[in-house]
Image: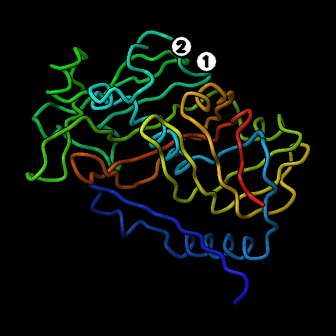
Amino acid sequence: CANRSSISKRLGSTSDPNFLHNWQYEADAEEVAQSAGKMLYADYVESGTYPIVMANSFGGVIFHEACGHLLETTQIELETTPFIDKKGEKIAHESLTAWDEGLSENAFGTIDMDDEGMPAQRTLLIEKGVLKNFLSDRAGSLRTGHPRTGSGRRQGYTFAAASRMRNTYIAPGDYSTEDLFASIDKGIYCKKMGGGSVGATGEFNFGVEEAYLIENGKLTKPLKGAILIGEAKEIMNKISMCSRDLELASGFCGSISGSVYVTVGQPHIKVDSITVGGR
């Protein structure tokens, strides 16, 4: 077959015994099949710099990977985070507020306490663009002076605990999703994110499984082959609008203390400009 298309959807819960019983798998299967069909004969995106709207839910994986890891005290100890001495300073657009917490009901990254016995809590990472806190385990707190946040996590007893994310998300804003699209004359809607890679200091590239061209505030045609290329500090200062429709998505995160279950999330967000690789 000359044309191929791949679309996926993931779900998860660590505490809801009715999760599988309540799963609307037929509706999800229909949604994924329709998306794959649209992408099968979509045009390839043209490389360039575009404003984009990024969908809610799993779109939050970029914040998790490119920004969230840089707010772990592990990165302060390794001296790889550009935010090492930026607490209390503006590091993002004023529209951006972000949290990490272990308390969301039925979320995949929810924990009663971390792997060092500290109760879970809500940690405000960024408030209106200002860096408020880092995520810290016991050793990270002793070495860096940042307070513990119940973030000491590990895959199992063969690993030492380290500062790790739990349920990490961009907070909802004041806009409707339609407001975000209406603000763009020509851009790209990134509806479903794929895999990617992130450098130690926040450089990233992420594939987009399902994308659409935005023209005069409207979705006009499907696009494929899009790759978002950027850097953490840059993208956080270009997230200028957040909608009200926060959703969370489940996943696993691998780092120095192994693979742990996490949640990522965000509302629909507008990024004023980003490099998009294509053809």
Q: Quadrant of residue 69?
A: top left
Label ID, residue 203: none
Mark 2 in CB contact with mark 1 (< 8 angstroms): yes
Q: Viewer-nearest of labels 2 and 1?
A: 2
**What colouring style does the render use?**
rainbow
Q: Is 81 placed above or below 157 here?
A: above
Local secondary structure at mark 1:
loop
Report which residue position mark 2 lands on: 90
Q: Position of residue 9 (x, y in %)?
A: 51, 65
Q: Nearer the viewer, residue 102 or 45?
A: 45
Three-letter code for the amino acid on which mark 2 is drawn: Lys
Three-letter code for the amino acid on which mark 1 is drawn: Glu
Q: Quadrant of residue 2?
A: bottom right
Q: Position of residue 200 (x, y in %)?
A: 42, 39
Q: Position of residue 8 (x, y in %)?
A: 54, 68
Local secondary structure at mark 2:
loop
Q: Quadrant of residue 238?
A: top right
Q: Residues within 10 Å of mark 2 (few under 14, many from 20)?
A: some
Q: Is residue 150 left or right of residue 252?
A: left
What's the residue at 18%, 20% (across, down)? 143
Q: Position of residue 87 (x, y in %)?
A: 40, 13
Quadrant for the C terminus in the image: bottom right
Q: Nearer the viewer, residue 217 or 232?
A: 232
Q: Is residue 136 left or right of residue 173?
A: left
Q: Is residue 106 left or right of residue 224?
A: left
Report which residue position mark 1 lands on: 94
What's the residue at 14%, 31% (across, down)? 118
Q: Is 149 placed above or below 117 here?
A: above
Q: Residues within 10 Å of mark 1 (few under 14, many from 20)?
A: some
Q: Is 273 placed above or below 110 here?
A: above
